[in-house]
Image: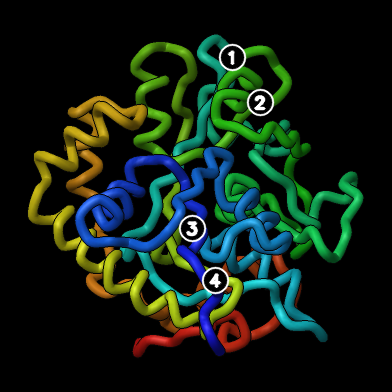
Amino acid sequence: MSAKPGPLRIGFVPEHFSTPLHFAQKYYNLNATLIPFPSGTGHMVTSLQTGEIDVGIGLTEGWVASLGKQLGDKEADFKIVGTYVESPLRWAVSTGADRDIGDADQLAGRKIGVSRLGRSVMTVKWQASLMRYSGSHVMGFVLADTKGWLQKPGDIPFKVVPLQTFAKLREAVNDGTADFFMWEHFTSKKYYDNGEIKRIGEIYTPWSSWKIVAQNSQDERLQSMFESMNKGLVYFGDHTDEALDYISTHLDYSKEDAEEWLKTVRFAQDVRGAKIGTISKTIEILKKAGVIDGGSPEASQMIGIFRAN
């Protein structure tokens, strides 16, 4: 299929993980308009479905959960075409600074703040054209499953409060609108250090954390995008001082936190394609947690470009 004219429109989350993408555009002619989505993967799902972006770089669990609800007797609005980060994501569990919640074990039945909602929340009017899951919502189910709070798949272990942005999530746990929320550890850490919120637990994703999706996996522009991104990732690895400077001056992180994050993250050496084993494992765990049901599609239906396991 022929490529559309003009640059790709790439949605991304403007956090530390986006630094190699910045280098790809700055130094390696990434022909794209980069569109930030501070509220995360769920918002990108909607924008892919409405044609506002061509490509999204977001959380594996958000893409798989949304595809699990979309795919059935119709073609999905997007497919997984690449792997951006190989290491798991460290999700921190946070509450208000002065709340009387001291541990994640106290959260059963409480109010979880999320950026965006998915179909599993029965109070939400669901439309087939707007199926989206945010990572902050999906991981609440995964947390509940690890704690043994899901009696059966599909149980709703928390009262869910949609709040859109990280700033509103922090505000909500302090004013009582929500009791807790889940967000990436290093993005949250600054607000532990300044006393705005407190950490009460953490959980790691049991899968590699960031994937690339595209509306059209046959778009000829993707190959050039992959090549530029691969070069940006190499540059990132070879120029850590520049990466640290960019993260600490252009993004919301201290240099010390960025240095600690660098010790934990492992980007893909080649971003093109996704492993069927990784997506299958994600589906299996999300089914167990009740995020997607037992009749959901197989991994092969979610992937547009495959790589060897």
The first of marks 4 and 1 along the sequence is: 1
Which mark lies nearer to you, 2 or 4?
A: 4
Which kind of residue does numbered mark 3 sit on? Ile
* Tag 2 residue: 179
Which kind of residue does numbered mark 1 sit on? Arg
Residue 147 appears in the rendering: no
Q: Nearer the viewer, residue 260 or 234?
A: 234
* Tag 1 residue: 99
The first of marks 1 and 3 along the sequence is: 3
Query: How far apart are the two marked residues, 2 and 4, measured between alpha carbons?
Result: 35 Å
| Residue name at image x 82 percent, y 86 percent | 73
* Tag 3 residue: 10
The first of marks 3 and 2 along the sequence is: 3
Which kind of residue does numbered mark 4 sit on? Ala
In the visual, does 127 lie left or right of 176? right
* Tag 4 residue: 214
